[in-house]
Image (cartoon, grey):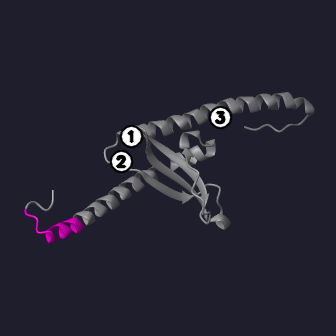
Amino acid sequence: MLKAIKKKQDYPETRELIEETHNRNKELANGLSDRIERYEKWLGQLPGRIEVTHWTRHPDSDAEQDDYGFGLKLCRVNKEWVIWHASERMEDDSPPDWKPLKDAPIRLRAFGIKCFPELLVAIRTKQEELEAAIESTFTEFDSFFAQLNVPGKERP
């Protein structure tokens, strides 16, 4: 609980409280990064994972800033799966500046973790879209290949 500064002599105590709070917040921030890394590792082992981007309303937006978005992106970097974040005004034409979520400011790390269920749903949705695109490609190829009158199996 915060204590009000009543006298000039309370400044040293206030400084000590700030340092203690800083140390506790640093521990908590490390806990956020640990959770992000655990989730990335789990996603990296999940069969069917797919690169995906999910956008939602930015935690700093208000009713007048409905165009301010917060994005999470799961993508493969070398052999690891990493969750990136970006903040973007929707009318901005420049590409988002993606950065690792585990290195984000504390409040954005916390918000990003709260968006993990939505990211998981986005992965499933992207899988369904990919499946539909592959089926459509099969149909187009099979139609094309049939016109070539090549004997043999048309579809794997």
| Image coords of residue 108 (percent x, y) | 60, 47
Q: Which residue is mark 1?
A: 44
User: Closer to us: mark 3 or mark 2?
Assistant: 2
Identify the secondary structure beneath mark 2.
loop
Q: Which residue reaches farthest left? A: 151
C-alpha gap between disc 1 and disc 2: 7 Å
- Tell me which residue sits at (51%, 58%) in the image: 55
Q: How many marks?
A: 3
The span picked out in magenta is 139-151
Going from the N terminus, do you reach mark 1 or mark 2 first? 1
Q: Which residue is mark 3?
A: 25
Do the CB atoms of the residues marked 1 and 2 lie less than 8 Å apart? yes
Identify the secondary structure beneath mark 3.
helix
* Residue type highlighted by circle 2: Arg
| Image coords of residue 85 (percent x, y) | 55, 49
Going from the N terminus, do you reach mark 3 or mark 2 first? 3
